[in-house]
Amino acid sequence: MGKLVILKFGEGSFEQGFAVTLQIGEEHERAATEITGKLPPFPEMPLYYSHWQSSYRQIGNRYRLYADKMQVTNVSMVQDCENASHILRARFNTWLRAEEFRPLREKWLERLSSTEEVRVILQTENSQLQLLPWHLWDLLERYPKAEIALSSPSYDRIQKPRTLNKLVNILAIVGNSQGIDTQADQALLQQCSNAEVTFLVEPQRKELTDHLWGKNWDILFFAGHSSSNKNGESGRIYLNKTDSLTIGELKYALRKAIENGLQLAIFNSCDGLGLARELADLQIPQMIIMREPVPDQVAKEFLKYFLEGFAGGESLYQAVRQGRERLQGLEDQFPCATWLPMICQNPAQLPPSWDELRSTKTEDIPNLAVSTKRRLAITLLSSLAITGFVCGMRLLGLLENPEIQAFDQMMRSRPAEKLDPRLFIITIDDEDLAIQRKNDESLIGASISEKSLNKLLAKLNQYQPRAIGLDIYRDFKAKEPDLINSLEKTQNLIGVCKGSDGTVNIPGNQPPPEIPKTNLGFSDFIHDRDGVIRRHLLFMNQEATSLCPASFAFSLQLASLYLRPLGIEPKFTPEGNLQLGKTIFPNLKSRTGGYQDIDANGGQILLNYRSSKQIAEQVKLNQFLSSPINPSAIKDKIVLIGVTAKGDSPDTWPTPYGVPLDEQMPGVLVQAHMVSQILGAVQNGRPLLRVWSLWAEMSWIWGWSLVGGVLAWRKLSLPWLALAVSITSSVLYIVCFSLLISGAWVPFVPSALSLVLMVGLMSIYSSKTKVRVASGE
């Protein structure tokens, strides 16, 4: 959005000086800055202009001025004109650098950036002030995107809404063109895209008025001869070789055309200030005129450059400035060509773009459409409402399932990690069970016989593992004396039991009688409503009637035993969180991330699985018992022993990596992930999964709703808008996925939902606003 600058000249004269008011503000809005100043008396200024004007007109380069054919004079007259222009420019800028005018100049420099597009409107009734070369003001030349326009202090807005045209309707009047080439003008207009041009070549007066009354025109174009009277109060166009008209003689027809939506009048002819003054009285929105007699070649080149820019997407003011400045290439033949094109502006109207001339926008849009501040306010309020709605749905648990599904998808998509070198897993599969039965080994009440278990413990102790985890329930006494002795004497052996739960009538499992209570850990898993294991229970208070006396998890007992030689013992913070070394394991709350109402009793954390595939080196029971083992594979490691068999009472669990039975993860591997998570966090700084605070999550969701608002205000077509939303949602997913890899579970589904809802809401609002504008509500 550009800036609007208005310079208002009050009562005064060049003999007395002028009171000047400077206003600066955003387009569509009231001025935010206003300051008054004064230009001192300078009675010689009109004389300098008159001298330049006289030398300019003496050159005579086939002007589009109705007069006898002018003769091209000699080079000395061209030099005289250039000298006069340099003097006028120097005196003009000296006047504008006067001390009395300095506060306005400094305020301009303070409030405006050279990178901004700036429309400058000069409001004055003084015709001599209007004639001055304001485009040569050194201050204005510092701003490459600024252009100045003239305006009368008196103006009104056209209230009647336009009837919209599918194409830009141009009424092109080609008047008396004796001695000049207007064919080029016609060809340039015909090349305009998305335009319908109606040509009237040397029309009669009635033919012209009938056309002005008969259709909704967007642009009125005139090429041919024209002139203004000496005081510049009125002008005349020459329709054909015998007829000429003043604007006053076309007043009613032109007023009707303006009421029907005429936006722009272009007089590509000579001496247009008189025409502009009369048309301004009819409140025409914009005009482009030539301040002095214009050479035919200059008129054609300006029209070409202007139409290239304007029809190509440039704003009206930028198209005029670029077209005017490109005339500098002709100034070796036509001195001061860049001085000629001028904009005359009705300050109550906003200059339309080429596309806006043929679209739903009309001249009343600045009043009926949403201003920048109002648009911002609507976007902020709408985004807050959407955020409140989405967060409300989230707190009610309506988004928990899709959030969990998105979490699982991201977990599955993470890159695989290396095997954990601290773990070694001995699995018991269906083949191991069959071999034990074949050897007549009793499996009553267990998945490993007493003979095989005794043999396994004996062989393991030879290799000096730091901890052995027996993830097999043995709620009965052993019969073989050697096994009883091994279970009692193996100090680094951790057994499992399962706590009871009276609320769901789960009796639990007793621990192995031979293993000391200090070497027991509970094996309880916490699964979500869909049965998937996503949380890790570290410690809990057992029920009074529980069969399991262990307060710490099996995984925590193994990890603690592994860390003990390093001087790391479990302790608790004042907040009740587990601490190992410098690592704190914050307990989950009932509302955590996507979870909105979970049972958060005990010490729970999110389970950050290490890999979807193999987590550590594994070997089957029979293979371990019958084959030689590399001692370094076991020494000072944690050995987990558990069942992976799928035939007899399988111990498998749904995880984010698979819910169907054939994709579930054996319990011993889930335990391995839990042990690895504890050790990785303590020893390697591997991130624990964490969530943001409630306010941070709400701010995050709100931010993405604002992004949706920005997309909606871009006014893209539906296919492009859908593509933009898809790309933005993909970026959101990538950001959330990257944060999850680094350990932060942030809301994806609520953010994406707020983004889409905001785009939909603001798009509907924007279309409704356009409908109201088009219908004139």
Image: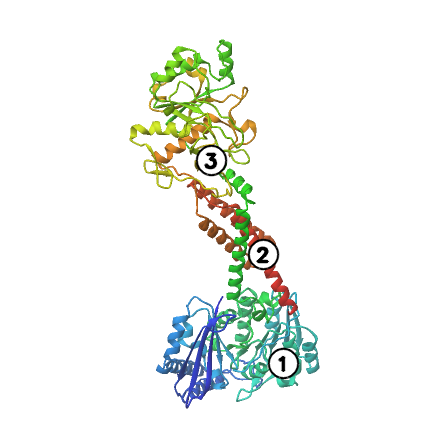
Residue that appears at 44% across and 50% down: 696
Q: Residues within 10 Å of mark 3 (few under 14, many from 20)?
A: some
Q: Disc 1 vs disc 2: which is toward the camera? A: 2
Mark 1 or mark 2: whose residue is earlier in sequence: 1
Q: Disc 3 vs disc 1: which is toward the camera? A: 3
Check the image and name the residue furthest to the bottom.
15
Residue type, label 3: Arg
Percent x, y of residue 130: 48, 82
For residue 164, above or below residue 511: below
SS label for mark 1 = loop
- Total tally of numbered discs in the picture: 3
Percent x, y of residue 624: 42, 16
Percent x, y of residue 298: 52, 75
Q: Taking 579 as reference, is 327 left or right?
A: right
Check the image and name the residue furthest to the front.
544
Q: Residues within 10 Å of mark 1 (few under 14, many from 20)?
A: many
Mark 3 or mark 1: whose residue is earlier in sequence: 1
Q: Taking 777 as reference, is 307 left or right?
A: left
Q: Disc 3 vs disc 2: which is toward the camera? A: 3
Specify the label residue 725 is tagged with.
none
Q: Residues within 10 Å of mark 2 (few under 14, many from 20)?
A: some
- Cα separation, mark 1 vs mark 2, equals 55 Å
Residue type, label 1: Asn
- Tell me whether the residue at label 1 lies in contact with that at label 2, contact meaning CB atoms closer than 8 angstroms: no
Q: Which residue is mark 3?
A: 535
SS label for mark 2 = helix
- Cα separation, mark 3 vs mark 2, equals 37 Å
For residue 82, above or below residue 532: below
Q: Which residue is mark 2?
A: 761
- Cα separation, mark 3 vs mark 1, equals 89 Å
Q: Which residue is mark 1?
A: 176
Residue type, label 2: Leu
